[in-house]
Image (cartoon, rainbow, N blue to C red):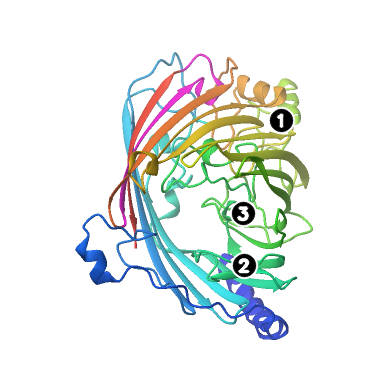
Amino acid sequence: MERVLLRRSAWLALLILYFVPRASAQLIPAASDPQPQTPPAAAAESPDSQPESPALLPHLETGRLWLSGQANFISQYHPNFHSPYSGPNSLSPEAQDASSRVLTLFTGLRLTNSAELLCDVQESGGHGIGEALGLAGFTNLDVVRNPTLGKAPYVARLMWHQVIPLGKNSSSSERTPFSLFSRLPDRRLEIRFGKFALNDFLDLNSYGSDSNFQFLNWTVDNNGAWDYAADTRGYTFAALVEYHDVHWSLRFAEALMPKVANGIHLDPDLSRARAENVELEFRRTVLPHREGTLRLLTFVNHANMGSYREAVANFLNGLTPKPEITAHPLTTSIKYGFALNFEQPLNDWLGVFGRWGWNEGQHESYVYTEVDQTVELGLGAAGNHWSRKFDRAALAFVSNGISRNHQQYLALGGSGFLLGDGRLTYGRENIAETYYTLHVWRGVFTSFDFQYISNPGYNRDRGPIFVPALRLHLEF
């Protein structure tokens, strides 16, 4: 099914690329080549000189093509922790370590001054501690939640990107694997269609969104209560429309949902399963000369989701041997929620950030993780303050919770796709995480990360857990 969707998306993108760019290609002024940076010879004369975007191989700063890559290696460990009992989806209380890797090749082709085609190929391997079970805020965002998927490379992203200007003024823009344009209109529409991850463009935060350089925990880098549409690897087929103005932006995404919770296969029938996401972003100068950002997100998921209340009732009435969230006829249920995301620089090197999220919590956690409410607060620091231009450090605290029906379901022995201790003495899952990312040389970075988790899996009978980690990141 995924191959069919890829072929259909590619053909549709090519058709759109043929017609739409002809109407808008002349509307965006051709990007002038940026001024050359320090010549290589001059840079070699100063051993302390560094490129603006350090990489082992220089990225193409001009032209129609983009080619880059990255490799992320993470090793984690947790010592023995207190646990009077365990269930089918518990994190093992015995000391263990685990390592993961994600290799990504980014490619792009700018077809006109307003249209481009982007394709990324990934290979992932290794596993997480406990095979990513037993924690709502799991400790490694790079881990694929189904270790049986295999090691074969796969297409992570294949998208068409169209920019439609709505005004004459434009500003310079940094070229990235997600946008090859070096200038963009201040007022514009952006349209993306194809395969990508919703959190590539929604719920972003400058201080906490990137497991390559920043935090590692699922519910620190992303809003845990946002059950965003994705397959097991985190990607979906979607259409995204963005309106950008000088001080605000509006985004809408329609995406495919998986056929089963945490499933690899997406459901192509939009009448049966889909997800709508809307994000409103405001950019304002709250502190003098320090522009802050506030993002408001809402989502509505339609899928074959079970009800915690009905699963508990079926068990208490003797219809099932234990609460089973999947024991229901094929149906389309609705799960909705809201999220808030803010970031505010305090000075040239320090900033504060946070998130809040809530979903209705009556239907099963289906895609991302088992969180119904979350609140997060953190501080991020840039290394330029201590003469380490590309270093960074941060500290964050997050508290996750679940609804009463979700609590009762787990307490009576039910299991979700991540949690299931067999019993439950409920308490909020509280997480503290800190890291330091050290720039070693060119595109080589290493990070030291530490996480403290109390009430793992919302269970006061287990834990706390300490999880130190090492990360090696290579940028090509």
Q: What residue type is labelled 2?
A: Gly
Instruction: Tell me where residue 346 appears, x and y as whole percent.
Output: 54, 36
Instruction: For the C terminus, give its image quadrant.
Output: bottom left
Q: Regarding mark 2 in the picture, which secondary structure is present there?
A: strand
Instruction: Tell me where residue 160 appears, x and y as whole percent.
Output: 61, 72
Q: Is residue 109 above or below residue 433?
A: below
- Residue at point 41%, 72% (across, down): 60
Between marks 3 and 1 in the image, the one whose residue lies nearer the viewer: 3
- Residue at point 68%, 70% (across, down): 169
Q: Is residue 156 above or below residue 437?
A: below
**Observer-nearest residue: 288 or 209?**
288
How crowded pointer 1 is (Cα within 10 Å; few <14, some 14-19, many 20+) is rated as many
Q: Mark 2 points at which residue?
A: 194
The reply to whether dot 1 and dot 2 touch (C-beta < 8 Å) is: no
Instruction: Tell me where residue 4 appears, x and y as whole percent.
Output: 60, 71
Between marks 1 and 2 in the image, the one whose residue lies nearer the viewer: 2
Is 275 placed left or right of 399 in the picture?
right
Residue 137 visible? The answer is no
Q: What residue type is labelled 3?
A: Leu
Q: What residue type is labelled 1?
A: Tyr
Work out whether mark 1 precedes mark 2 in sequence or the reverse, and give the earlier one.
Answer: 2
Q: Name the residue under label 1.
A: 308
Instruction: For the N terminus, give its image quadrant.
Output: bottom right
Q: Name the residue under label 3.
A: 198
- The alpha-carbon separation of the residues under discs 3 and 1 comes to 26 Å
Highlighted magenta segment, given as a residue range: 443-462
Q: Regarding mark 1 in the picture, which secondary structure is present there?
A: helix
Residue 403, quarter of the rendered image: top right
Q: Regarding mark 3 in the picture, which secondary structure is present there?
A: helix
